[in-house]
Amino acid sequence: MDDLLEKLNNEQREAVLHDEGPLLILAGAGSGKTRVITYRIAYLIRVRSVYPSNILAITFTNKAANEMRERINTLIGDTSRNMWVGTFHSMFARILRRHAELLDYTPTYSILDSDDQQKVLKECIKEMELNDKLFAPRLVQTIISKAKNDMQSPEEFSIMAGNDMRMSTIAKIYRRYNDRLLSNNAMDFDDILFNTVRLFKEHPDVLTMYQEKFRYILVDEYQDTNHCQYLLIQLLAKRYRNLCVVGDDDQSIYSFRGADLSNILDFEKDFKDAKVIKLEENYRSTSTILNAANGVIAHNKKRKMKNLRTSGDEGDPITFLLADHHGIESYYCAESIRRDAESGAFPYSEVAILYRMNALSRTIESALREKGIPYRVYGGLRFYDRKEIKDVLAYLRLIYSDADNYA
């Protein structure tokens, strides 16, 4: 293990060697948090002799989960296969499959994607003879999703709606929608977390079993957790309290989809004896960029104080343009890229343009075309959202369960 520890700075080493009890790792951008998580897992297994099957590591994306799994496997070999490493939804869907009958589902329940959810909602709205302009399926879907993330059942949502006729009507749609899913042995993505909380609260014996199993829990990107995810982690960690959460309140950007920043800000209130370690050494950016980032983020009111630093180069100065219109921004970028590329400063393939929303890409593309700059737009439909892939998956779902009417 000493050979691994030599590769860490003091703060990283302290986090890896933390003993028992709750641990909050405030990891600034580019501070090596993935290395800390994987090395800590290796430390628990190789030095503390913790069984890999007693460790649960949760990330937010499949890509991050695969990367973590590969790194752990490189450190400790095939032993890592017995660990549970994955996203919130993949881990808790796995638990629900084992105990689905306790919630009146079968283990072969299907999981609806966003398009399928809207189809079901359209059916419900039509059956209730409601105006789909006043009760647009996409908007109703967003409201129901938020309710589930906040652990509000249709009944609780109805009470909250009170005398608000519109919200009361949405509560009725919510109830019909949920009944429709249950009768078809189907869940949406929000149900996976909502129903796991239900499972743990309504069946304490099941909760106890998983508390005993997962004695060490690690959660990445904790600043992006919503209320439902927060409850799941609190329930599982309550018995042994060996909870390690890693995150950065300065990088919280998902409040629009239910992320609750107070989860990370109030960690020390939830666990009075929590150890807090700050990873402030950045290995990714120049000091110029870090100083600018520190200067901007310092104005945030709700944050844990930290100051990123680097031992790297000062770097080039940052150019700031305050334009009156996004068209001016686009043409400035295009002209700057053309000028520097033609002078030999860099090839076009080394340039990336980031924009705040997809609607802004049109003016950027127009400017690039006018300047004769070759480009490629990254994005578009995800693999599983393609029509032909959805068709194949629908056939497979129907083969798996002939009760799946939405296949």
Image (spheres, helix red, strand yellow):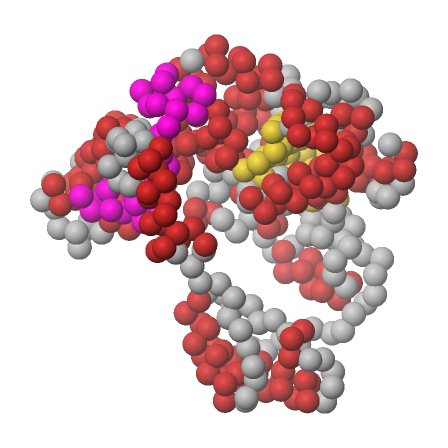
Foreground of the two, 149 or 276:
149
Residue 175 spot, x, y in % from top left: 23, 32
Where is residue 376 shown, x and y percent of the image? Answer: 53, 73
Q: Residue at x 57, y 17 (%)?
A: 211
Q: Which residues are magenta?
A: 97-123
Q: Quadrant of residue 185?
A: top left
Q: Residue furthest left?
A: 129
- Considering the whole magenta stretch, tell me its main secondary structure: helix
The quadrant holding residue 45 is top right
Residue toward you, 175 or 406: 406
Residue 115 is covered by the magenta coloring: yes
Is residue 170 visible to the viewer in this orientation of the structure?
A: yes
**Is residue 68 rendered to the left or right of residue 313?**
left
Query: Is residue 273 in view from this perspective?
Result: no
Q: Nearer the viewer, residue 338 or 10?
A: 338
Counting from the top left corner in percent of width and height, residue 151 is at 38, 30
Using the rendered view, name the quadrant where residue 210 is placed.
top right
What residue sits 83% from the left and 65% below the top?
313
- Count of numbered circles on the image: 0
Quarter occupied by the C terminus: top left
- Residue located 31% across and 37% down the image: 398
293 to the left or right of 402: right
Q: Residue at x 49, y 78 (%)?
A: 364
Q: Nearer the viewer, residue 324 or 259?
A: 259
